[in-house]
Image (spheres, rainbow, N blue to C red):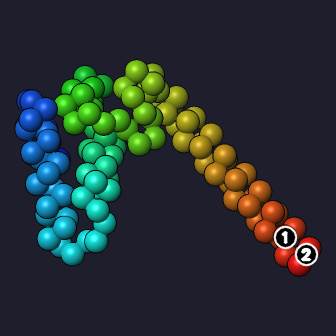
Amino acid sequence: MAVALACTTREQAQAVVADEVKRIQADGHYRSAEELRLIVKANIGYLAGYYSRDEAARLLDLFETEHPFFGKIEDWPKSPEDALKMGFDYAEAMKKRRRDALVSTAAENRTV
């Protein structure tokens, strides 16, 4: 992240992403360069969440990305309590989705 934090232009940010994609490919990962580029940018967006709102906004803008959970900076929670509530709400939605999928699978198996 230190390299990303040092960026001051979009050109530098693009170079950091390209270098990281090349490094990952050299490690033997077989995803496409485009998939890796999106993953790298999502990771930078995620890590931006650990910095001040101003620094996060700067990083998200430079790297033309957003936080994978909170989205664009203007949609970010206004307080840690709001972020925690978003996390709990998301977890509940995932539990419901999993329960619904299990019920659906069970129902399909009974009709076969």
Which residue in the structure is indicated by mark 1? 108
Which residue is farthest right? Answer: 111
Question: In percent of the image, x 69 and y 59: which residue is there?
Answer: 98
The answer to whether residue 78 is left or right of residue 102 is: left
Question: In percent of the image, x 84 and y 70: which residue is there?
Answer: 108
* Numbered tag placed on residue 110 in the rendering: 2
Residue 34 drawn above or below residue 76: below
Instruction: Determine which quarter of the picture holds residue 103.
Output: bottom right
What is the spatial separation of the Cα atoms under label 1 and label 2, in whole angstroms? Answer: 5 Å
Q: Does the rendering let one see residue 49?
A: no
Which residue is farthest bottom? Answer: 112
Instruction: Determine which quarter of the picture holds residue 11.
Output: top left
The picture places residue 80, in percent across and down from the top left corner, at 45, 31
The answer to whether residue 75 is left or right of residue 45 is: right
Question: In percent of the image, x 81 and y 63: which residue is there?
Answer: 104
Residue 15 drawn above or below residue 82: below
Q: Secondary structure at mark 2?
A: helix
